[in-house]
């Protein structure tokens, strides 16, 4: 009966200092951070870590079970599963991060522009956002791929097109409040130039909530890239990508289950990592015990 | 012998090794009101939350509470919460925070029954409305359509809905106008046989409480009946508490006219708010603006700050009608903490004025300038690399004063800068404001507390609603 209700953008005040230290102390943050670092290493150095060339068929060793030489087995054309997982990581994870960064940047720029300009610029931008948000993201993504044709690059563009509007809407709400906040008002009265008011007093309150949301959304992007690749609309043969690997080997589930289990586990772990990290960021952003 | 309605014995609260409350015991007799006085941070709110079973699990609570249905250990939070509403009612500080903004006030009041799985009693709600002076038709409106005073009454109705013998109230009037505070207090006392009022406002407590407890640093340091206030026989700690809140004397003002307003008409939403205003501000003086909410005090400040054009009338700055220049005007907000970048250390916040424009100093001197300004306003004990989130409201207000002293504006607009502060912090913040005025700033001090304005301002302008006689009254002319 006496609970307080607060808008999330008000409470999302994140101190950037000591973030990693606080994250390590958080129950889920330490695990999330460790997983993210491990996955990042795999995504960055995957091609060099791979023991075999990921796309080279070796028909003599097709459908080998896990064992020495091929630790995760081989697929129907004898390609080393471990190498393909390591090589595919940068497409699955790197693509998700790229999409996340792009929609955060687009959202931030649109939101801050709308809040700063106000009047018809604000109205025009936000009505456009409304139109995009009215369409289901999946439909937008399919439409973009339909226009541009299947392919990894086009898939990323499609995912950006499907997701940016939501970020722009939140960025605009945060920026609207920050532009008119007492802190920004005082800075302007003091005579701080407008670009620095934006840099110091508007950008951070917009950036931090979007970072938290972006991290939480990363799992969704990973799953989306994998799902579209599974459908054949993303990464094309012979390149490795976790979702595409699932698609290629789904008919062999009964004879070579390891071909499905390993990429599925990788997708699961990445989604888990981004959720753990995002949750920790969100908790650190809402200080406990503040009434 | 009558039994007490509420009896607390040996209440202690500790977070880890830090004790916030130590050995608090008191009785509340039927028909009485108990006032619990103390500065911010002394543990008043923790005390209430302990009785309500609302402390976080990390708090270690000891002690016992006895109500009509028997004794209960205060560490048993679930059992305490089960008694909420039935045996103990609670009125929160800010009625707008207490009500869900998307539900009607009637739903809020009915929640008192629903929380216990009971059916709301329409007859009881009607009776409460009559008793507390609420308009039953208003109940179907949303909280934002209510005034603070009326909404606080609705809150009281929700607290006493199940007729608990005891009501606990946490600063029940701090969020409402001075005019409506008295009515709210009367409602509170009428609502239940026994009342516990927690406040930092000594005059309020002295007026409404039969017994007064003073809590300092988590312990009860003085107890006194109401009669002791009139008789002037207060225990020493209470006497000190009363005197430490005394306000600083006003100072003479300079002769430079910083701003001259003539026949200023304030308009909001196409509606004229008050009769035309004319006044002038001189350097070094504190000019008080008093008036109820809704008369356009905030609109006046926006016009003086140059954020809004005046609908009619002229504002001359240094004798010329022009927009304020950079650094000429500075606003002090009621919520000082909101006017600071929460991610910056204090030294950077305070030094912001000297990072730009003609006042710019090299980066190496900026922190030093900030530390000197902080020391000037009695904050030398605070680490300059602390973040605003670690400050109390009073300290926050003094940090903004330190920033203002570096900005050296000609005109300072202070919007209720002390309304959230306890008497000691208020006195310190006002001393800081006087200090700022001595350095040559003209200060416009907006408040609904006329006693406060009379005490600190050189001149006070009373804003009147339209059609209420004279356009303004100036009084307290201490030249």
Image (cartoon, coloured by chain):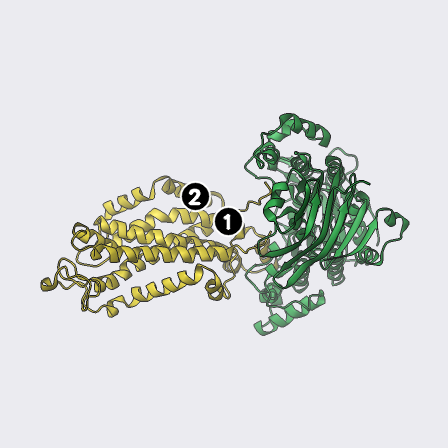
Q: Distance between the residues labelled 1 and 2?
A: 20 Å
Please identify the quadrant where the N terminus of chain B is shown.
top right
Query: Which of the 4 image quadrants contains residue B297?
Result: top right
B359 on left or right of B419: left
Chain B colour in the picture: green
**Viewer-proximal residue among B411 and A225:** A225
| Residue B165 point in image, percent of width and height | 71, 38
Circle number at residue A8: 1
Q: Mark 2 points at which residue?
A: A126
N-terminal of the pair, mark 1 or mark 2, is 1
Q: Residue at x 73, y 54 (%)?
A: B24
Residue B259 at least partly seen = no
Q: Colour of chain A?
A: yellow
User: What residue is shown at x 41% (from left), y 57% (from top)?
Assistant: A276
Where the C terminus of chain B falls, by quadrant?
bottom right
The residue lying furthest to the right in this view is B231
Q: Pointer 2 indicates a residue of which chain? A: A
Residue B323 visible in the snapshot:
yes
| Residue B231, placed above or below residue B116 | below
């Amino acid at each position: 009966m006496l609970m307080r209700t607060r808008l999330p953008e008000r409470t999302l005040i994140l101190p950037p200092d000591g973030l990693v230290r606080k994250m390590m102390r958080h129950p889920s943050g330490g695990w999330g951070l460790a997983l993210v670092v491990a996955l990042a290493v795999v995504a960055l150095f995957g091609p060099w870590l791979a023991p075999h060339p990921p796309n080279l068929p070796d028909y003599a060793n097709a459908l080998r079970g896990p064992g020495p030489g091929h630790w995760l087995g081989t697929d129907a054309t004898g390609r080393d599963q471990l190498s393909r997982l390591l090589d595919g990581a940068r497409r699955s994870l790197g693509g998700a991060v790229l999409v996340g960064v792009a929609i955060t940047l687009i959202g931030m720029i649109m939101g801050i522009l709308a809040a700063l300009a106000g009047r018809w610029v604000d109205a025009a931008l936000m009505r456009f956002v409304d139109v995009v948000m009215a369409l289901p993201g999946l439909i937008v993504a399919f439409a973009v791929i339909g226009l541009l044709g299947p392919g990894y690059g086009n898939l990323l563009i499609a995912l950006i097109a499907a997701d940016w509007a939501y970020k722009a809407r939140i960025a605009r709400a945060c920026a609207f409040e920050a532009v008119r906040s007492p802190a920004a008002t005082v800075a302007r009265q003091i005579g701080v130039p407008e670009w620095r008011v934006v840099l110091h007093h508007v950008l951070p309150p917009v950036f931090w909530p979007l970072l938290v949301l972006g991290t939480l959304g990363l799992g969704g992007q990973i799953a989306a890239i994998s799902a579209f690749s599974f459908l054949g609309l993303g990464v094309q043969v012979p390149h490795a990508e976790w979702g595409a690997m699932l698609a290629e080997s789904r008919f062999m589930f009964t004879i070579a289950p390891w071909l499905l289990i390993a990429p599925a586990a990788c997708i699961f772990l990445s989604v888990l990592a981004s959720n753990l990290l995002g949750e920790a960021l969100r908790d650190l952003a809402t200080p406990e015990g503040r009434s | 012998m009558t039994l007490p309605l509420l009896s607390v014995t040996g209440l202690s609260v500790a977070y880890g090794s830090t004790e916030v409350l130590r050995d608090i015991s008191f009785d509340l007799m039927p028909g009485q009101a108990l006032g619990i006085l103390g500065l911010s941070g002394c543990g008043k709110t923790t005390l209430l939350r302990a009785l309500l079973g609302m402390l976080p699990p990390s708090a270690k609570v000891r002690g016992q509470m006895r109500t009509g249905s028997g004794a209960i250990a205060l560490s048993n939070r679930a059992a305490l919460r089960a008694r909420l509403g039935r045996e103990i009612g609670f009125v929160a500080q800010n009625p707008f925070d207490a009500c869900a903004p998307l539900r009607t006030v009637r739903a809020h009041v009915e929640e008192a029954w629903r929380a216990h799985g009971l059916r709301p009693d329409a007859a009881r709600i009607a009776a409460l409305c009559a008793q507390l002076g609420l308009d039953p038709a208003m109940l179907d409106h949303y909280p934002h359509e209510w005034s603070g005073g009326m909404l606080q009454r609705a809150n009281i109705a929700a607290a006493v809905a199940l007729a608990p013998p005891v009501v606990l109230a946490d600063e029940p009037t701090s969020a409402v106008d001075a005019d409506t505070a008295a009515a709210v207090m009367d409602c509170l006392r009428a609502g239940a046989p026994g009342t516990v009022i927690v406040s930092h406002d000594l005059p309020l407590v002295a007026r409404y409480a039969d017994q007064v407890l003073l809590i300092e640093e988590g312990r009860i340091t003085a107890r006194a009946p109401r009669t002791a206030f009139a008789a002037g026989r207060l225990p020493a700690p209470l006497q000190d508490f009363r005197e430490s809140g005394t306000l600083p004397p006003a100072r003479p003002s300079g002769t430079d006219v910083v701003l001259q307003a003539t026949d200023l008409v304030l308009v909001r939403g196409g509606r004229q708010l008050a009769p035309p205003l004319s006044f002038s501000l001189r350097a070094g003086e504190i000019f008080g603006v008093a008036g109820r909410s809704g008369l356009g005090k905030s609109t006046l400040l926006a016009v003086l700050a140059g954020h809004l054009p005046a609908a009619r009338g002229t504002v001359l700055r240094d004798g010329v009608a022009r927009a304020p220049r950079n650094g000429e005007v500075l606003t002090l907000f009621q919520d000082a903490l909101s006017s600071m970048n929460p991610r910056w250390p204090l030294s950077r916040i305070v030094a912001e004025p000297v990072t730009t424009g003609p006042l710019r100093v090299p980066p190496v001197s900026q922190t030093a300038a900030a530390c000197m300004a902080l020391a000037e306003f009695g904050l030398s004990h605070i680490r300059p690399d602390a973040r605003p989130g670690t400050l109390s409201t009073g300290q926050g207000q003094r940090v903004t004063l330190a920033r203002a002293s570096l900005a050296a504006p000609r005109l300072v607009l202070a919007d209720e800068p002390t309304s959230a502060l306890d008497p000691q912090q208020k006195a310190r913040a006002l001393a800081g404001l006087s200090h700022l005025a001595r350095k040559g700033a003209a200060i416009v001090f907006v408040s609904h507390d006329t006693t406060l304005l009379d005490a600190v301002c050189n001149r006070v302008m009373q804003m009147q609603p339209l059609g209420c006689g004279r356009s303004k009254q100036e009084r307290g002319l201490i030249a």
